[in-house]
Structures are given as C-alpha cells and as structure tokens.
Amino acid sequence: MDQTLESSMRPRNDNRDRGASVSLVNLEKSYGPVVAVAGVSLDIRSGEFLTLLGPSGSGKTTTLMMIAGFESPTSGDIAIDGRSVVAVPPYRRNIGMVFQNYALFPHLTVAENIGFPLKQRGVPKAERTKLVGEALELVRLPGYGERHPRQLSGGQQQRVAVARAIVFKPRLLLLDEPLGALDKQLRENLQIEVRRLHAELGITFVLVTHDQDEALTMSDRIAVMNDGKVAQIGRPEDLYDRPCSHFVAGFIGQSNFMPAVVCGMEEGVVVAKCQGILVRAVASQPPAIGAEVSVTTRPERLRFADTTVETGPSVNRMSVTVVEAAFAGERCRYLLKSDCGASMVLKEASSATIRRRAVGERTEIAWSIADTILV
Ligand code: ADP
Ligand code: MG
C-alpha cells in the first residue's frame, strides 16, 4: 500500500477539531521496584492516528492506562486539550477504550452492550436506540443488535467492542492490541476498517501494538517504545528510512548491521572503515573520529552490481560471496558474506528475467549512501 498517497487522500483536515490533543510530560510509573514507564514526553495532535509500538514489557499498556485514568502516574503530567487530567476520574475524561479481549458482557445483547456507556451517562432510551443504530452502521454490523456476543465471530465481537467505545462520541479512542487475538487475514481486514473509522470520525486514535507491520500501515506517526521510554517518534517512513538507534533499526523492518570505526567526514557524509573497507553513511549528528559505530542498511536497498558500472560518490560498493540463496515468492533473499567479514541480507524482486545467484558465487553489491545510516 502506498502510505503517502493513502494519508494524503484521507479527509482529516476538515475533522481536526473533533479530536482531542494529548500531552504527556515526563510521565513515570513505578510498581515498587519495577519502573514500567520511565519518563515519557509526547505530544499527540488533534485528530492524529498515533501508535505506541514496542516489544512486550516496554510500557505501552501502562502509558495507555494512565491516559485513560485507570492508573495514576508516579510523577509527570497528562494534559488533554491543554488541561491536566491527572485528578480527573476515567469516566469524566470522555475517552473510548478497546482492549484485546473484547470484554463484552456475555449476558447482554449487542445493542445492550453498545448502549451500556450511554445508559451509564443517563442518555434517554430513544436517543440510545438512535446512537446504537448509528454505531452499528459505523462498524458495518447493522441488524446485529439482538444477537448475543457468543453468536458472533471474534472479528465481529471486536467490532462491537469498537462500537461501544465510540457510541458516546469521545474525542479520543485508545486501542490496546485490539486485533491481537485475530488471525492474520482478519487482522489485515480490520486494520483497514480501523483506518476508515479514524478517517470518518476524525477523532484522535492512540493504538498500542507490538506488530511493526500493523504500526507502519496504520499510523500517522509511531512512537517506538523500549524500556519504558520513547526511543524515537516520527512518521512511518521517517522511522524506516532514518532510524536513530540500533534498537529502532532492528525493531522496525529488517536491517543489516556492519560494525565500523569512524575515519572522518567528507562533504557532510561520514566515512567509516569496516575491516579495511571504506563505507559512507549519513548520520543525524557528526560522530567523533575513532568512534566505534554500526552502519545499517535495509536488505531491499542493496543490489547486485557486477553487471552495472555504477560508481562514484553516491554509492557504497563491496565484494561479497553468496552464502545462502532462497526463493520466497515475490522476492529472492540472499545471505552474503562481505570481504570485511560482515553478514548481509539482500532482497531482490523476483523475475523470470533476473538471473538467480548460486551459493558460493563471488560478486559485487552496491547501495546508496543515502540508504546507509550510522547508528
Ligand atoms: P507492554 O504493554 O509494553 O507489554 P506494560 O505497560 O504492560 O508493557 O508493562 C511494563 C512493565 O511494567 C513490565 O515490566 C510489567 O511487568 C510491569 N507492570 C505492568 N503492570 C504492573 C503491575 N500492575 N504490577 C507490577 N508490574 C507491572
Ligand atoms: Mg501491553
């Protein structure tokens, strides 16, 4: 899917004021000696789709629970639309929440489940019926109101949970691994549904996931979390093309890493040496000469270059030996050993016109300096 095209097609500007803005300021949460959230500062924009992405235990759920008000911070502040909500109870924050396990009431019908938050808020019956009907339309389940949760599939139950979370028209929706219990095909369909819902409602969505593909395809911005902190925040393409650390480069997408020593700078580009072989890379900050670093690049940005004559200032080149060759449908995947001892993975689109490489073959690879990042 073309991410840039998709996002530019979404009618978000008209809806901007419907979504809450959220500011987290030095947010911390400890459980005794366990530091779950270790100083998170984050500005979530009105109407934005922001994802907290990170491995298990990185503090994503705890951060979300503090925004919702089910956990209180050990220190730091949370402001919604510019006003601190730390002292405001959950039910007065006007936030919708969806969990991984649906958490529907089994003894209530779908309509009663969805109407529950309205009843809690004292909304009269006629108005409730109307709003429940609208919410069922929004999640594409019209006519399902009289069923019980056990009469629905997992995907349908999760749609009901989403309907229940948006029926009272919150300005902010929090979703904690909402698709985690579903199989791959259903998950991908629902990812598209959740994005559509975001575009239609125009409210702010904060999604928690450990699935990098889900984060890349769904989000306006991603905050990558590690050890209770935000490791990097940015648009999906920023994180993919310009990871700021070894952790982010390894967690989002696949990356090759080459240990190297910094030799100097040349026209804004870092020159580093990997076992005697020079590699040029871009860096967010100029590194110290002599620093031991990693140079990283994506497998699909490497290409075989023994048949082409591209040289010059904008590419890195290296002699390699093919160690493993695998056909994987749309791509061929090669494990290469460079003369400097680094292992590299190269992915090439498969085509009947492209010669497959054999194990043991010696060849040359090339890749852009712009795709080579110092971390
Ligand atoms: P994630 O959602 O990213 O998997 P969590 O926010 O659930 O991570 O947890 C972050 C850390 O805090 C983990 O080490 C977890 O074990 C710990 N933790 C979370 N909730 C509690 C709790 N109620 N009591 C003690 N430790 C907790
Ligand atoms: Mg969690």
Image (cartoon, helix red, strand yellow):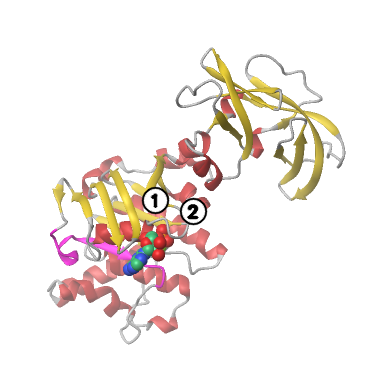
Q: Amino acid at mark 2?
A: Glu
Residue at the image position 21 percent from the left and 45 percent from the top: 17
Q: Quadrant of residue 119?
A: bottom left
* Residue 204 picture location, percent across and down: 29, 51
Ligand 1 falls in which quarter? bottom left
Res. 246 in view: yes
Which circle marks residue 51 in the picture? Answer: 1
| Image-based side of 357 in relation to 186, left or right | right
Q: Of marks 1 and 2, which one's residue comes earlier in the chain?
A: 1
* Residue 108 picture location, percent across and down: 30, 84
Q: Which residue is mark 2?
A: 214
Q: Which residues are magenta?
A: 87-101
Q: Residue furthest bottom?
A: 107
Does 36 sit above or below residue 290?
below
Instruction: Kindly indicate whether the residue at mark 2 contacts the one at mark 1 (C-beta within 8 angstroms).
Output: yes
Does 310 sit above or below residue 374?
above
* Residue 195 picture location, percent across and down: 41, 53
Residue at the image position 63 percent from the left and 34 percent from the top: 259
Q: Amino acid at mark 1?
A: Thr
Q: Residues within 10 Å of mark 2 (few under 14, many from 20)?
A: some
